[in-house]
Image: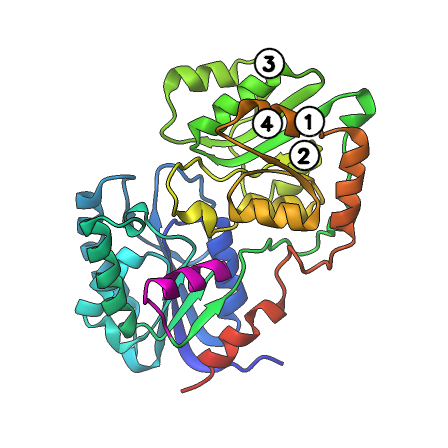
């Protein structure tokens, strides 16, 4: 039986309606006597309104001036939600929101930051990157806990002399109550001699689109089903992609409600992280939502070389690795995607524990323990 804390949880979504963040809120709120859900709204996310959600304003992508103004206004709303500072925990996602919480009295609450990724400016050896890392090193001392979604972030930050005594890793596993991944089925793809690739989520990688178009043109028997939102994609490229005869773009979707029906339509999942030619970056540290979703639904995966996902795909023998910079090698990888190999990869996924890709109470044991300490 979970210990219920006589405290209040103020949970702040960086994107109102984000399925994974909302899932985290549902997993955590049960140990609190009281809880409130707040969130920033964004134009690229089709959110479902959750009961009792409190809006913190609209954030325009890429506009940091707008973000500062929104953050300042949000602080007034957050302060109005806090009844007792000493008995309140604020769980939030955005690292650049931390200075505002620190300097506007909210540091009196317990602050818990989840870091699913790092901004690009954090990486590299430029003066700006070093200044950002120094600022982070100073600010994290105000945090009570940091939650990472990959152990690689903990290792990487330690290599930059940034560490926190209460760092916890909770992977971004799928939260789908009542759905058994072992019962997931296909609906007429391999059976009719076609192999269907699924590409789902935020569609923001032009390299992925170009690679997929080139592969579809050079290969027989492949089709692509796409669900998601195009973000910062060249309009001509997007048009070529969505009008290609082998591509079926089916619009946006609601997660997790539509996931099962979407994955039933495909044989293999494209889980490639957005392309980067830098030596350091999130692509080497983070594991994508697509990785956990595809694994949960027992769909073999296509991952990009050099990514954290690719290491897992290779280790589990559950798909192929493609090289963005070598098209011939990519074609060779795609040639391995056949009926026989798909069945082998699916069997390897089937043999994994049901909780390998799906969230369970065990994933939260360490966090619940430290939250229960006064």
Which residue, given by chain and number where applicable, does mark 1 sit on? 196
Q: CA distance from mark 4 to mark 2?
A: 18 Å
* Image quarter of the C terminus: bottom left
Which residue, given by chain and number where applicable, does mark 2 sit on? 268
In percent of the image, x 51 and y 18: which residue is there? 242
Q: Earlier in the sequence, mark 1 or mark 2?
A: 1
Q: Position of residue 187 (x, y in %)?
A: 77, 30
Q: Secondary structure at mark 2?
A: strand
Q: Is residue 219 above or below residue 29?
A: above
Q: Main secondary structure of the magenta part?
A: helix
Which residue, given by chain and number where applicable, does mark 4 sit on? 329
Which residue, given by chain and number where applicable, does mark 3 sit on? 217
Q: Which residues are magenta?
A: 150-164
Q: Earlier in the sequence, mark 4 or mark 3?
A: 3
CB under 8 Å between discs 1 and 2: yes
CB under 8 Å between discs 2 and 3: no
Q: Using the rendered view, name the quadrant where residue 154 is placed.
A: bottom left
Q: Nearer the viewer, mark 2 or mark 3?
A: 3
Within 10 Å of disc 2 (Cα), the crowding (few <14, some 14-19, many 20+) is many
Residue ranking furthest to the bottom:
374
Q: Nearer the viewer, residue 212 or 247?
A: 212
Q: Earlier in the sequence, mark 1 or mark 4?
A: 1
């Amino acid at each position: 039986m979970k210990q219920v804390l006589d405290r209040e949880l103020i949970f702040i979504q960086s994107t109102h309606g984000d399925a994974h963040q909302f899932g985290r809120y549902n997993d955590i709120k049960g140990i609190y006597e009281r809880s409130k859900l707040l969130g920033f709204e964004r134009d690229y996310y089709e959110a479902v309104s959750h009961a009792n959600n409190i809006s913190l304003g609209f954030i325009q992508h890429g506009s940091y001036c707008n973000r500062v103004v929104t953050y300042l206004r949000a602080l007034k709303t957050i302060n109005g939600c806090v009844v007792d500072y000493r008995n309140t925990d604020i769980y939030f996602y955005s690292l650049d929101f931390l200075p505002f919480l620190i300097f506007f009295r909210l540091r009196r609450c317990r602050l818990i930051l989840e870091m699913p990724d790092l901004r690009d400016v954090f990486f590299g050896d430029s003066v700006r990157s070093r200044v950002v890392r120094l600022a982070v090193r100073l600010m994290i001392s105000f945090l009570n806990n940091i939650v990472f979604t990959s152990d690689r972030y903990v290792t990487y930050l330690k290599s930059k002399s940034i560490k926190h005594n209460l760092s916890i890793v909770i992977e971004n596993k799928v939260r789908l109550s009542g759905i058994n991944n072992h019962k997931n089925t296909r609906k007429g793809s391999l059976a009719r001699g076609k192999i269907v690739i699924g590409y789902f989520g935020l569609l923001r990688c032009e390299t992925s689109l170009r690679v997929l178009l080139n592969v579809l043109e050079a290969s027989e028997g492949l089709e692509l089903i796409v669900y998601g939102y195009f973000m910062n994609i060249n309009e001509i490229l997007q048009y070529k992609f969505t009008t290609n005869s082998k591509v079926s773009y089916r619009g946006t979707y609601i997660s997790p409600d539509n996931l099962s029906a979407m994955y039933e339509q495909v044989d293999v999942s494209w889980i490639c992280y957005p392309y980067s030619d830098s030596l350091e970056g999130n692509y080497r540290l983070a594991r994508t939502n697509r990785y956990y979703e595809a694994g949960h639904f027992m769909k073999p995966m296509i991952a990009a070389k050099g990514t954290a996902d690719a290491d897992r795909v290779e280790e589990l023998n559950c798909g192929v690795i493609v090289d963005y910079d070598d098209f011939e090698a990519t074609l060779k990888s795609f040639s391995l995607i056949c009926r026989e190999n798909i069945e082998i990869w699916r069997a390897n996924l089937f043999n994994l524990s049901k909780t390998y890709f799906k969230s369970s109470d065990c994933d939260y044991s360490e966090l619940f323990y430290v939250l229960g300490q006064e």
